Image (cartoon, grey):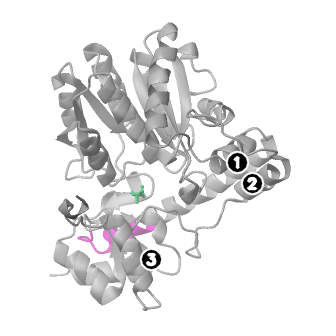
Amino acid sequence: MLDKLSAQAPDALLALIKMHAADPREDKIDLGVGVYRTNEGGTPVFRAIKQAEQRLLDTQDSKSYLGPEGDSGFVKALMPYIFGKDSTLGDRVEGMQTPGGTGAVRLAVSLAAKAGVKRIHLGMPSWPNHAQILEDVGVETVAFDHAKADGTADIDAVLGAIRGAGDADAVLLHGCCHNPTGIDYTAEEWTAIAEAFAETGVLPILDIAYQGLGQGMEEDVEGVRTVLAKVPEALVAYSCDKNFGLYRDRVGAFYMIAREADQVSAIASNANALARANWSMPPDHGGASVRILLEDEGMTRVWLEELDEMRTRMRRVRARLAAADNEAPGLGLAALADQNGLFAMLPLSKDQIASLREDHAIYMAGSGRINVAGLHGGNTEKFIAALSDVTKG
Ligand code: LMR
């Protein structure tokens, strides 16, 4: 039986981690997988998370099962940050903990499919795992263009996708810090998107994986809130992997917004059943740590300061890259200063990407995506020089 399985290509991003690790060159630069890095190139545990983990260690008196919904204190503690302190969603929203943002997206797509969704419109390029999850769940991906050549969002394409969607369609959008382009919708564009969803009744699936790493904690979810204020129902996938630095602990949340409050428990019971059949219940440690952090004013302050430091550092790198393009046009970096989050797409050919890796020990995704956070004071100038080398003439 098992011999019928043919070999699958390894996940390209995860394979890149291994290739970079195996490269003996000391000045190698990892711009591959999306993890934040400090100015020294490390990905340390957040100070606030260390404090919360210590308290968890000191106070946790049982590791008995919770349930498919996970730590509901964690799920509730995140809600004011996502939906706003003055959210009017009230009892129309219910959430549950998931294994990372991936678990949340998986649950959103599976629940949509269970409710009758057959096709999901997805702006391309997107995080490669989006299309992979859709395929695995058995939902068709309908692609539209996310971005225009000038480095801004293709608003006509997303509005066309929403307005042209059929009865069994949903539309999946990145809430902020678009992966892989870094190109987000403007406030005016989000308003137009919200109106299109409201007028058509198409189900929005909103994926928020980088809150706080674009323009700010509040700013990064203004678009999502604009949509949620106008639509009757929506699904929201959330990741704490990046903004709490909990990558390997797999911490995410999934929220369902129903038309009426009395429909919420039926919807959530379906999500619970799907979770039970997939992973039974999410891992506890990271979610419990986030709950402890968010319930403590001091730890929350430290966490927000850490996020500010990260965001400011990445904006500095973006500004430097855009300035380099100004000094020597043609590097494809000009639009980066106005984009958000960890990622940017560079207009490089396969050969140029290979040359950056082989000749300069610079590792990036095959799509031309770079992780801006992989650049810092010690390697940015080398990167600019290498880019200039592979793009000249
Ligand atoms: C990325 O896109 O690099 C991250 O979201 C990590 C992942 O799981 O792919």
Rendering quarter of residue 231: top left
Disc 2/disc 1 C-alpha distance (Å)? 5 Å
Q: Which residue is mark 3?
A: 380
Q: Which residues are magenta?
A: 320-331
Disc 3/disc 2 C-alpha distance (Å)? 34 Å
Mark 2 falls on what kind of element?
helix
Mark 3 falls on what kind of element?
helix
| Residue 129 falls left or right of residue 210 | left
Whole-percent x, y for residue 256 in the image:
47, 25
Whole-percent x, y for residue 194 in the image:
35, 23
| Near-viewer residue (129 or 220) | 129
Question: Which residue is found at the position 15% from the left and 24% from the top?
Answer: 164
Disc 3/disc 1 C-alpha distance (Å)? 34 Å
Identity, as a three-letter code, of the amino acid under mark 1: Ser
Query: Is residue 257 visible to the viewer in this orientation of the structure?
Result: no
- Residue 289: give its label: 1
| Near-viewer residue (291 or 214) | 291
Q: Earlier in the sequence, mark 2 or mark 1?
A: 2
Identity, as a three-letter code, of the amino acid under mark 2: Glu
Q: Is residue 321 magenta?
A: yes
Q: Earlier in the sequence, mark 3 or mark 2?
A: 2
CB of residue at label 1: within 8 Å of ligand 1?
Answer: no
Q: Which residue is mark 2?
A: 53
CB of residue at label 2: within 8 Å of ligand 1?
Answer: no
Question: Which residue is found at the position 44% from the left and 61% from the top?
Answer: 34
